[in-house]
Structures are given as structure tokens and as C-alpha cells.
Amino acid sequence: MKPVPIKKLFGSRDLLRLESNKVDLQIREKLIFSVICVHVVLMTLFVADMQHRQRSFLLEAAEAGALKQAGLTADAAAFWVIADDAAGMNEVLQLSRQNTPVRYAFIMDMRGQVLAHTNREQLGTFINDTEILRVLHSPKQARVWNSDEKLIQVAAPIMVEDDTLGWVMLGMGTAPTFDHLRKIGLDGLLYTITAIILGAVAAWLLANIVLRQLGLILQGVDRMQNNDLGTPIPVVVDDEIGKVARALNRAMSSLSQSAEKLQKEMHERAEAQQRIRHLSRRLMDGSEEERKRIGHDLHDELGQSVTGFQFALHSLRDLLPHGTKDAGELCDKLIGYAEEMGDSIRRIAANSWPAALEHMGLVVAGRAFIRECAKRSPNIRFIFEDTLPEDDNPHRLDPRLELACYRIIQESVNNALRHAEAAHISVEIHEQEHHIILQITDDGCGFDIQKTPGQYSSEQGGIGLIGMHERAAALDGTLHVLSSPGNGCCIEACLPLLRS
Amino acid sequence: MRPVPFRLPFICLALVCLAFALSQAGCNKPEEKKEKLPEYSDRPALPLSPPYRFAVHPQENVKRVFAAYSPLAALLKKECGTSSQLIVPLTYDDFERRLRERMFDIALADPSQVFESLDSGYRVLASAGDRNTYRGLIIVRRDTNIHDVRDLAGRPLSFSAPSAFASTLLPKAFLHENGLDLHSCPMRYVGSETSALMSVYFGKTAAAGTQPRLWKQFREEHPEIAASLMVRWATDPFVTDAVIIHTSVPEKEIARIRAQILGLHETPEGRNVLNGIGISKFEPSTTEEYLQLARFMQKHAEAFSLAPQSAMQKGAQ
């Protein structure tokens, strides 16, 4: 299985850095904002609720205090009302104002006449207030007859046994209550701001603690991305994030072991591949040697024999007496057979070992091969282009490179002739950046490389796609096949330039 | 969907909450609106005629006196339609001063106050209580060695007020008649009969003056203390307290009030009122009956620290 790159596992380095920055900023902000918002909401609710309760409590307390004050004043005034002593009543009222927020106080009899008043101008006047007059004839108990944001007004009966002598009316200011409430509100605001600040600082510290470990984790991931699996992530906290760091360390350790194992396997595989390639090269070299020997034998020995046989037949026909028509015709026929046999032997010898390649180089041999093909397939148009220097140049290509190129051209063209039903076949040879580039293109029916690789394997002694690959790889080159059904085929080989 | 930026909703929420908090902190100032204060007028809102001012002399705790006599005032209003304001001055001096200044329309006064009020335009409407029971009592501790009037010589005596007739003047007259030089005795006027008796109980004084009705009441309220006290002497009965009325009250009204007062003992409701006051009934009386007080005052002028001539002049008048 092909090893998966670490970058694919963890994403690109830039993306990771971007993510790490984003996390770094957002977690701190989120924490601080969340804590601030929670503090603001909770403290606001708390302060509002506290104020509401305090307001109710203080107003109730103020009303209770006013009622109590009025009751005490009524009790104290009873003697003076019984005695009809205005001075005494006034003294009681003045006493009721001492150290209390009493705004006004007066004593009235059951007719509504003011018997005593903290404002002496009202002495002897009559109450002309329906609400207070209603109090005169209501049940004999102290009550709040009017209460608003500024003044709590209460009434308390002046009783002796069951007799009501009159009423003490008292107005108590609420300023102290609201001053107190305002102070509570301001204190609450101060507490809220303090809580926000403390919360924000705590969140900032917490974020730093969390982000420190996260930062170390991200640095560790960066190292992993750079294949540095040997340096573990420092664990500075013992919480969940610390556990994540430990888990990552374990994963890194496991990954490191796997990577080592993989490296070892890859090394072994490369060595094996090298050995196979070496073996393949030796096999190919052996094969080429054998083909060369067979080609030489066919050309030098069998070819010479057939040529001698031809000469012998010609001599035999010349020796035949006139009038032996049948024997002459037979000799001609045998001479024809011998010529065909000679052609076949030369062709087979050329296929097994192109002598032109050995003696005249790749371009000449290539052209000769194409010419031969064109002769055999007159319906197909062949094109051969090259930009290589002349083959007789002192810097001629290495024989191994020439042979590999020739074989690739030979195999590609033979495949096209056999399977492609092409109208055009072109062969291009170029030198580019210390590489030889071969391109064999046809406009034939094409094929699906993934589905039918075997169709283009070697047949009848051909080297096939695999053989072409092996030949290219043996010279540290590459070979690519581009084809699809209906779109022809293009075989491109890129081989390092070697000079002889 | 486009993600909502993280900060925006939180910032908005925080600002709203802060604004709310600030508003909460500053909203406790009372709203500036007009106060509702009581309204006054020179004329009464209720159509009630001014009541008669009915005063009772402060023979004891004013609240108790008020509670005792308020049913009488209520009954007078109910039966006669006479609205009255019951007044119990805190002191005898105040009561007598206001009598002299004609500040009461009707009053229940002791004999000396009745006698004094005659100069101020008052006249007797009825006498209060049984004539035989109106006398002075001299109270001492049971464990005392006082057996004779002269044993009190030089020892402090306690009374409610200098001018209380039954509780002060009658006992003083008795002691004077029986040979005690009152000038040798420090006089303690302690404001009420109860206080005078408590002074004897605590040993601050050797004897105290009171009257039968109040002594009975004291024994009911303080039986343990009363048990250690005893009546050493009782004076002869004298004319009782009287209801006096000012001559400015219309005759028709005077007649109605007199009839109502004198008939109290004839109805259950009236008897309840009398029971609360501590007398059995009001009896018809005249101003002339109280003129004998002049002779009494003259006889005991020395005991009362009055100039004999002054007392005689009052009697002549």
C-alpha cells in the first residue's frame, strides 16, 4: 500500500497555522466575553432583584416606622388631648419630629379641626380633604392613607379605652429610603463592575492556561507535519487538554514506530525493486545479446547459405540445355522461393538485432524501421521527426539508450499497426534538458489503460507496455501512456541523456 | 448559511445589560411629581356644631377619669343631643385656672372648686354621689406606731394636690382640729391619690389623704399593697363633688342636661354610667349648699395656709 503523506492526514501547514491563530484568538475572546456577559447578566439580575426587594422592604419598613411613630405620637398625645392642652399636643408633635424624617404632623379632633400642627399657621383650621375625612369615620386603627415616592402619610387614632378622641396625622418623607436605595444601586453597580473585571481577569488567566497547552499541542502538530515525530509535546496541565496532549504523544510515538517500520519496508522494497530491475536489465541485456547472436547467425550464416543456394540455382538454370522448359521454370520458382526466404531471414535478423542501429545510430535505424513499416503498410501515413544531431557525430548516444529508444519505438509502432487501425503514426525524437524525449502518436481507436493493459502487452516476441516501462526505468527514465477509447494513443518516454 | 460573528450578540447583550444595570442604579430617585398634602380650610367640612366643653377635675389618672366619664358625655349627646367635648386637665391648678377663665361649659368639680367657680359665672346643677360617703380618709402603714394624730407631728404627709377637697382639705382640717400642727409636717403633693398612697407604702411619708371611693378603687387594683396599709382616721362627711354649668349655656339646654343627669340612676344604661364613675346617682343640689364651704374654709384657714380674712371674704360673697 502506498504510504499516506502526513500533510494529507493533518492538512496543509498554512491552513493549520491559520486555524491555530483563529483558535488562539477566539477561545480567549469567547471566554472573556462569556464571563463578562454572564457576570453582567447575573449581577444585573441580582442587583435588580436586590433593589426590588430592598425597595419593597425599605418602603414597608418606612411605612411600618411611620405607623409606629404615629401610634406613639397618638399615645403620647392622648393625655394632652384629654386635657385639651394645645401646648402639650404641640410639644408631642415637635418631639415626634426629632431624629425622624417627619415632614408634617398634626392632631385633629373628630370634627376635623386641627388641634395642633407642626406648622403653626394651620392651628384651628379644618381639614378639607375627603381622604382624611374618610379616615375620621373609618375603623379605629392606624393606617397608611397615602403613600407615594416622596411621602408616606399615615393616620393613627388617639384612643382612650374605646373612645376615639381624634387622630394623629403624620407625613414621613421617603428621602432617606431612596438615598439608601440609590446607595445600594451604586454599590451594586460597583460590585458588578468589580465582578466583571475579576471575571475577565480570571477568564484571561484561564484562557492562557488552556491556550498554553493548546499552543504546545499545535507546535507538536507542526513538528509532526515536518515529520519530526521524536520530540514529544510537553504536558503542562493535568486536565482534559493535558490528556489530549498525552494522547497525541502516544499517537506520535505509535506513528513514529509505524513510520520507522514503513521506512524499513520501503527501503527493503526499493532494494528488492533495484534487484528486480537489475535482474530485468540483465535479462534484457541477455535477451538482446541472444537476439543479436540470432540476428548475426541468421544474417551471416543462414543468409549466406540462402544466398549461396540462390547462386547455385541460377547456375543450375544456366546449365540447363535449351528445350528443357519445365526444368527452367522449376529453377525460376526455386530461385523465387530462395529470394523470399532471404528476405524473411533479413527481416527477422533485422528485428532481432537492427544492424543499422549498431553501425549508424538511432535516427538512421529509426528512419529505416519506419520506412520498412511504410513499405509493409502503404495505407498508413508515417511521420518521423527528430532534432538530434547526426548519428555520425562524435557525441553519439550511449548504445544502451539507443537500443532502449529503438525498442520503445519498435514496440509502440508495432502495437499501433496491430491494434490501432490508425491512419497516421508519427514518431518524434527530441533532446531536451539533458533528456531524450520520445513521442509515438497514432490517431487510432485508442484504449482504456486501466481496463485493458494486457492487450498491449508483448505479443509474438514484442516487449509490450510493461517491457517499455522496464526499459525506461532501467535507464532511470519514465514512460507515460496517454490513451482513451476513440482518441488514439500517445506514448511519451523521457530518458536521461547518456553519451557514448 | 453565513455564520453570525461571535462577538456581536454578546456585545449587544452586554451593552443592554449594562444599560439596564445603570438605569437600575440611577432609577431610585423619586419621580418629580407634586406631593399630595392635606388640604385645610377655615370652615369645617363636616356640618357639626361646636360641642359644649365638659371638664372633670383630675381626681386621679386623667385617662382613667376620661374613660370613666366619656360614657356620660356620650349618653348626654345621645339623650339630649348635646354634643360635648370631655376634658380632663392634667392638674388641679390647670383645672381651676381654666374654671376661672370660664373655659368650660360644664364641669364636675370638688366642693372647694365649686365654691371657687361661683365667682366665674358657674352655678350648681347637681351633686355627685351619696352625701354620707363623701369624706376624707387618712391612710397609714399597718406596721406604723402612729396611733394618735399628734404622732404625725414633724413627719411628712402626702396628698394628691393642695386643693383636692376630699383628699386634701378634709384630712388636713381633721388633723388640724385634732391638734396637729400642720406647719411642722412637710407636705408632699404628688399629683394623684395613687401616688400619695404609694408614698406611704414606700415609707416616704407617714400618712396620706384620700377619699373612700378612690381608696376602694386602690384596694381593688393593688390588693397586696393595700393590705399593708390601713385607714387610721376618717373625717365627717361633707358636701360632695358637684356638676356646675356656666350661665352662658341656654336655660333650655341646662334644664335638659339637669333632667338627664338626675335621672341617670333610673335607667340601666344610666346606672352603668354611674357605676363607671363610682357613684350611685346624681342628686339635686343648689349653689347655696356650697356656700357653707366659706365657713369651713375660714375655720381651717390656718390649716390650709390661707389668710383668714380672704376665706371670710369668700364666704361673705
Image (cartoon, rainbow, N blue to C red):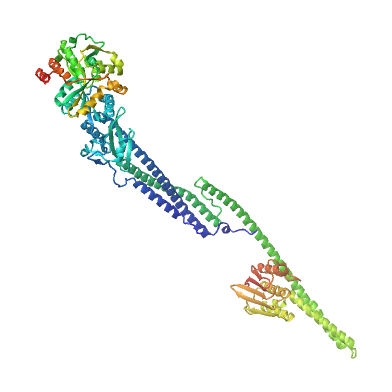
At which x and y percent is residue A404? 68, 72
Outermost residue to the left: B309
Name the one closer to the observer, B197 or A359: B197
Count of marks, rendered view: 0
**Image location (x, y in percent) of residue A380:** 71, 80
Q: In which quarter of the image is residue A55?
A: top left
Q: Which of A372 and A142 is in front in this view?
A: A142
Q: Is residue B238 visible?
A: yes
Q: Nearer the viewer, residue A62 or A490?
A: A62
Q: In this view, does B12 lie above or below B226?
A: below
A319 or B149, which is in the foreground? B149
Q: Is residue A259 left or right of residue A338?
A: left
- Please provide percent x and percent y for residue B276: 29, 22
Compared across the picture, whether A395 is left or right of A335 comes to: left
- Does A385 sit left or right of A234 as displayed? right
Q: Give the quadrant of the C terminus of chain A.
A: bottom right
Question: Vertical placement of B82 versus B292: above or below?
Answer: below
Task: Using the rendered view, name the quadrant where residue A128 is placed.
Answer: top left
Quarter of the image for the N terminus of chain A: give it. bottom right
Query: x, y percentage for residue B19?
Result: 38, 50
Picture layout, residue A479 above or below residue B284: below
Which residue lies at the image location 34% right of the left edge and 39% below the top edge? Answer: A59
Say which quarter of the image contains residue A191. Answer: top left
Residue furthest to the bottom in view is A322
Any part of residue B61 in sight: no
